[in-house]
Image (cartoon, rainbow, N blue to C red):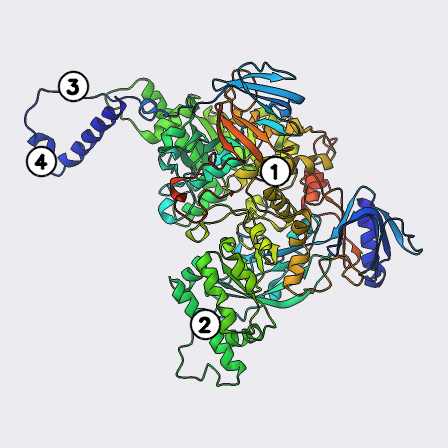
Amino acid sequence: MRRVLAAALALLLAGPAVAQERVAISGGRVVTNAGAPLDGGTVLLSGGRVEAVLPAGAAVPAGYRALDARGKWVTPGIIAGMSQLGAAEVHAVDETNETVARSAPASAALALEVGLDPDETAIAITRIEGVTAAITAPFPGRTIFAGQGAIISLGDGVRQPIRARAFQHVAYGEMGSRIAGGTRPAAWAEIVNALDEAQRLRNGLVSPMRDQHRDLRVTRDDAEALVPVLAGAQPLLVRVNKAADIRQVLRLRTLYPGIRLVLVEAAEGWMVADEIARARVPVITLGMDNLPGRFETVGATMSNVGRMVAAGVTVALGTPDLDVSFQPRLLPQYAGNMVAQARLPGGVGLSWDQAFAAISRAPAEIFGLVDMGRLAPGARADLVIWSGDPLELSSAPEAVFIGGISQPMESRQTKLARRYLPGQPETGLPKAWTR
Amino acid sequence: MMLAGVMVAGLALSACATTAGGRSAATAKPAEPAAPVSKGVPADTAFASTYRPFPGVPTVITNVTIYDGKGGRVDGGAIRFEAGKVAAVGKAVPTAGATVIDGAGKWVTPGIIDVHSHLGNYPSPAVQAHSDGNEVTGPVRSEVWALHGVWPQDPGFGRALAGGVTTLHVLPGSANLFGGRGVTLKNVPGTTALDMVMPGAPWSLKMACGENPKRVYGSRNQMPGSRMGNVALMRQTWANAEKYRADRAKPGPQFRRDLQMETLADVLEGRILVQNHCYRADEMAMVIAMTKEFGYRVSAFHHAVEAYKIAPLLAAEGICVALWADWWGFKMESYDGIRENLPFVHAAGGCAITHSDDPHGIQRLNQETAKALADGRRMGLAIRDEDAWTWIGINAAKALGVADRVGSLEPGKQADVVLWNGDPLSVYSRPEKVWVDGALLYDASNPRLRPVSDFELGQAGEGDVK
């Protein structure tokens, strides 16, 4: 491990041109997400990209650093379908929490990337578990529009998001109702009012600030921020759970034909799965909720994801809630549970391939990240070498490449663990002197 | 008999309430022969468990891998249970008169015990009307009982059963320094909460240190507003309890029953076990110091995100620690969480327990255990699978004071048994059948053997595979 770290540091100091070394990873079970897994295949990385994926037995060309992955699994990096990564060092310490702007005058116009911290400790803590990129989202505060989220790389030292202002996030259902004034009609009116204002701006009509005839509930900045949503340039992520609420949200596709909807959570999605599929609307959800925690989730079941996928819906797993017990670094565990669900009599889950795609290829597809989520020539070299089946609880990443750069396998947590590992000899000094 | 006692006590209370306001209704009653005033019965009798094991048949599972919950493992083993109790565990067991299940490729474990749950007190749906887990009206509320707020319709009980949980300890929340009494339940959802109480299990006292009490009361400009205030108020309360205990031992004419002090005095006399919410190593050390001053002990520290920093101290004191596998970072006192907390405590010779504190987590305590086990092994610790199962087996039973009846598969113990469809330390495995006291109450392949709470009847997804 120390050697890997030293190598990574040396590469970083030498600059990215050298850091994106040519690497040949051979002998492992290669999950490409672009066809059947290749046992004993070779993945060539070069210039921060996947250069080639070769079948077992193919000759490895010269000039590549060889990594022996025999007995290991080689996969694209995990993409967290939704998270707050980079946006909160300690959730309960408000000064470090960029996810909710409770009393800000602006809403849809807020752009999360301004507040993202690439040095947040959760980045490394999550990276060493095989997560190489994340959809990171603001949370609704004063109004139901949370603002614009980003797609970030978890690469060490990466300062820029992969995509800023990647989507707009809005709450409907119980959360939307509460924020909008107490009812779903109030939340709906707020969504329609804001999108109509954006429509008027887009059509070159008078600025809402000067229009005396309309009751304005969004600022001009917010309305302007929604223009790309109407144009379909920015997907609109709608937090919604109840079957009836999902049907209502799907009507936005008719009212605003250019809009690209993504449903978030969708606990009762299975009850309207055919309608979601017909509307070609993808879903991002945790997949693990099976309790009627709210009246809008009365139908919650861990068969939800399996049933939606069976109906033809693209589903990515993510951690869209602020409930910190569900962490993006645990997405492989959740995907594994989708496989387990399929093995229960009467349960509907996912095949292994579908489950792994739900934490890698599916989020890439939903956000149009064409060079991510797969191991294929030209794809970003975001790749993980696992000790075994990545969805299994006993497995762990042994090496992580992001943008072709070998990542340090250390975090604040690994350092704490090393300091307190049982059975170490006394140093004659307090713990604060040990590192 | 018991009902009558409660009713008489109720009438007496209402009589007291009306005397101050004027004529008591009781005085207007026609004269009757003077009935002797009921002396009532002790609280433990009045609130006695009405749990009755459900009927089962003598059952044998053969050819199965067994983690026995106390660190033992039998490959190609067998178990027999009948009359609600484990009869035999080993390579082979008598099969006469029993329903025999072939366990080839499957695993058997004792039913999982969760020492930290709020099911029933913070049930689903989590509407305000159901929020009964914290008596947030004062930092010392040792007089309240979690039992009195348990809603037995909580669908979470049934989900936990499908996750292999057969015993759970429901605790008040952590808003208060002294949160009230916790109760150990058999996970057989009943019509009343008393139908679920494990007979003979000791009560616990929930205590909390750290951020929660000082935040809740400090924000009201009330003590405690700091960790200093936390400890000062806990010490003063113990001092009051010492006095009460002495007075109770020799009650004079001025002695008046005080429910708040009664629970604390029972702790000082060792009849009630302390379950102490505490995250940080330095604070756990302060609590241990306080237990020396007042002569009580902590049964388990809960959450204990920094237990790994003082694992030898906790082992030496014989205090269990109930932990998440990997929760961290959501507040300052959880900032130093590591993935190896459970295995580090175990490796130091301590009593490590995997707990949930969560209606979803309780369904996967086997997975949480498996993750922590793997993380420990990667740090070079040699811990066997069957050792790790003690974290949700006998160690959990010890912390609750019920290790003589549950937590391991041994002859004479309650037949709380889970048959898994594969290695329960794998993400792909789930309980296939769950017996509680020898009664088959969950069968993954039989929709009739799946609890559907009153709340769920007639709702979307009724009886679904959850």
Side of A278 relative to B144 (left or right): right
Give the CA distance from mark 3 to mark 4.
22 Å
Question: Which amino acid does the dot numbered 3 rest on?
Answer: Pro
> In the rendered image, which residue does mark 4 sit on?
B23
Instruction: Tell me whether the residue at label 3 lies in contact with that at label 4, contact meaning CB atoms closer than 8 angstroms.
Output: no
Q: Can residue B239 be seen in this view?
A: yes
Q: Is mark 3 in CB contact (under 8 Å) with mark 1?
A: no
Secondary structure state at the residue bearing disc 3: loop
Q: Residues within 10 Å of mark 3 (few under 14, many from 20)?
A: few
The reply to whether callout 2 and callout 1 are in contact (CB within 8 Å) is no
Disc 4 marks a residue whose amino acid type is Arg
Q: Nearer the viewer, mark 3 or mark 1?
A: 1
How far from the left and from the top, in percent, is residue B19?
13, 34
Name the kind of residue labelled 2 in the image.
Answer: Val
Q: Position of residue B61 (x, y in %)?
A: 59, 23
> Circles 4 and 1: CB distance less than 8 Å?
no
What is the chain letter for disc 2?
Answer: A
Residue bearing mark 3: B36
Q: Left or right of A410: which side holds A104?
A: left
Spatial CA span between label 2 and label 1: 44 Å
Q: Which amino acid does label 1 sit on?
A: Gln
- What residue is at 86 percent from the left and 57 percent from the top? A22
Depth check, front residue: B338 or A46: A46
Q: Distance between the residues labelled 2 and 3?
A: 72 Å
Q: Mark 4 lies on which chain?
A: B
In the rendered image, which residue does mark 2 sit on?
A: A192
Indicate which label's residue lies in the foreground, 4 or 1. Answer: 1
Q: Mark 1 points at which residue?
A: B367
Q: Earlier in the sequence, mark 4 or mark 1?
A: 4
SS of the residue under disc 2: helix
Query: Residue A68 location, x and y as percent?
Result: 85, 46
